[in-house]
Image (cartoon, rainbow, N blue to C red):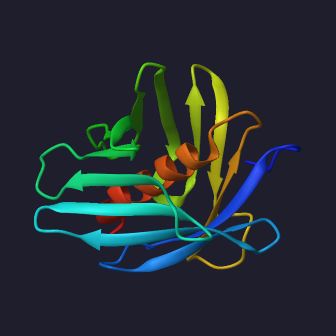
Amino acid sequence: MAVTAGWTTYQLRRQLLAIGEDFWVQNAQGENVYKLDGKVLTLTQTFALQDASGNELARMSAEMFQLRRTMDVERGGQVVATVRKALFNILSQSFTVDIAGDGELQAHGDILNHEFQITSGDQAVATVSRQWFVGDLIYGISIAPGQDEVLMLCIAIAIDEMSESDRH
């Protein structure tokens, strides 16, 4: 999967969501653009995506003990998307993203190895790959023009976190 001209690319760290860990999301120039603040509360796992000044742009949360994992993406206290992990099968892993009032996205490909696309119908809206960077702990997301970059970043982070246990 190649980076497409006109798309915006960000760099993220794999295994990024250790308990309480914060990290920066960098743009293609290596500048810190967003910060992820991870917290584990009693029965809920919560991550806040902030701008470089620390203003919260979105919040992701998941109940810790669910049979079928889901993670909600919230803005202003309203759920704007729900990321659902499809039932795992040995050949592939996939996710469905329900966008509040705006349909559904699919994530498919080699999700465990960070080589997948997020699509709306048969149109790619974001591509996730670690081939663009040196090292196993870094992956990137390239987002199509006109897409909600904060939402796409939240979806990629949610998928990464929800897939982590399957990598071991």
Let me know if residue 1 appears in the view: yes
- Report the side of 35 relative to 160 (left or right): right
Which residue lies at the image location 45% right of the left edge and 24% below the top edge? 104
Let me know if residue 83 appears in the view: no
Most foreground residue, 90 or 127: 127
Most foreground residue, 128 or 82: 82
Which residue lies at the image location 34% right of the left edge and 37% below the top edge? 79
Most foreground residue, 152 or 167: 152
User: Dividing the picture into quarters, in which one does residue 7 lie?
Assistant: top right
Q: Residue 88: give x, y in percent of width and height.
A: 28, 44
- Report the side of 65 relative to 112 (left or right): left
Most foreground residue, 91 or 62: 62
User: Dividing the picture into quarters, in which one does residue 92 lie?
Assistant: top left
Q: Is residue 36 above or below residue 62?
A: below
Total marks placed: 0
Instruction: Pick out the residue farthest to the right.
Output: 5
Which residue lies at the image location 48% right of the left edge and 31% below the top edge? 106
Q: Residue 155: give x, y in percent of width and height.
A: 48, 47
Q: Residue 78: give x, y in percent of width and height.
A: 34, 37
Q: Residue 74: give x, y in percent of width and height.
A: 38, 44
Which residue lies at the image location 39% right of the left edge and 54% below the top edge? 59
- Report the side of 81 relative to 125 (left or right): left
Q: Is residue 16 above or below residue 92?
A: below
- Report the side of 17 relative to 108 (left or right): left
Quadrant in the picture for the C terminus: bottom left
